[in-house]
Amino acid sequence: MLKKITIIGMVLLLAFSGITITATEPELPDLIITEIVADNASSDVFEYIEIFNASGRTIDLYDYSIAYVADLTSASYNGPNKKTELVSGNFSTSLVDRSRAFDNPSEFLLSPGDVVLIWFWNFDSYEARATISDFRAYYDLSDDVRVVAIDADNSAATGNPDRFNLQNSGYRGICIVESNFTPNSGYDDVISMATLDYGKIQPSMPDLAVVYGKPVKAEEKWRLNMTAFWIEPTPGYLTEAQKLEFDVGAGSTDSNTAAPTFDKLPKVIFTILCVSAALVFVFSSKRRIER
């Protein structure tokens, strides 16, 4: 009997000791793809991805590249199979006529919480001779929205087949990697990946966005969770739901990586659960003794 009372006492002590129970969730990547617009109404001149600095430090955008997984259903791809660098100055890395391209800023630093748009300047952009002013006008961007272009013209005639754009079919992965990343080297060095699974989100809706949140699986901390698709885009700004999820404005982006706690649950409820567990143990022990 004394043993049973001791067990109940220990359980009650734990209930009122203020111990915090934590739930493990994946670590938040430093750079997150938060939004993709992969289709435009007429031709695909102004496709983009949006990137958010979720880290607690300033990041040089030109230390990173955008990578691509052509088919996430195929075992023949060992991680991203293509990569294009983000570069200062003339953004073209392979255009036949580089004069159609324009200069990215000479320096591009992202402070904690900053957002940037990466314009996928592709074959349609090339044909349209699209400029950064055209892109800003298309989305009616305010002056505080920051934009850089990336060479996405994979046409053999005007660009390079090793480049890639934002496709409107299949199951693709768009990734952020460091510039020294080696294609086909797996996912260990992928910072974050947003997927476009057209098997689930067909048909593609022009000028609407797919948006992303925190990773779901700890073992795949680079795979972002698609939270909504074909919604009105907010280029250069997080959605209200993303602000809540990433805890934007809480004072420190370091808090984004903290595991959620349940210490705010009413102590009465927690105590009831603990006492119930103790009583089950006592009565089960009593029945075994009687037998």
Image (spheres, helix red, strand yellow):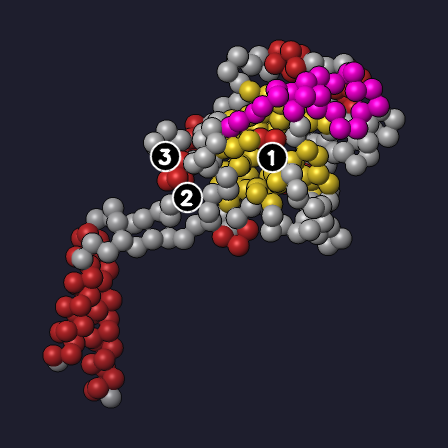
Query: Main structural element of the magenta stretch: helix, strand or loop?
Result: loop
Q: What residue is shown at x 29% (from left), y 49% (from top)?
A: 262
Residue nearer the viewer, 100 or 275 = 100
Looking at the picture, which amino acid does disc 1 mark?
Asp
Give x and y (percent) for residue 253. 40, 36
Q: What residue is shown at x 83% (from left), y 19% (from top)?
A: 97
Locate residue 167 relative to residue 256 in the image: left or right: right
Residue 199 — which label? Answer: none
Compared with 125, 154 (above or below) is below
Residue 173 is at least partly visible in this image: no
Residue nearer the viewer, 1 or 258 = 258
Q: Quadrant of the N terminus?
A: bottom left
Residue under circle 3?
252
Compared with 272, 140 (above or below) is above
Residue under circle 2?
257
> Which region shows up in magenta?
88-110
**Element under disc 1:** helix
Q: Earlier in the sequence, mark 3 or mark 2?
A: 3
**Element under disc 3:** loop
Q: Which of the 4 image quarters holds residue 170?
A: top right
Give x and y (percent) for residue 221. 52, 48
Residue nearer the viewer, 207 or 124 = 124
Residue 63 — which label? Answer: 1
Give x and y (percent) for residue 34. 54, 33
Looking at the picture, which amino acid does disc 3 mark?
Ser
Looking at the picture, which amino acid does disc 2 mark?
Thr
The answer to if 101 sits in the magenta stretch is: yes
Q: Callout 2 environment at 10 Å: few (<14), some (14 to 19), or many (20+)?
A: some
Q: Quadrant of the C terminus?
A: bottom left
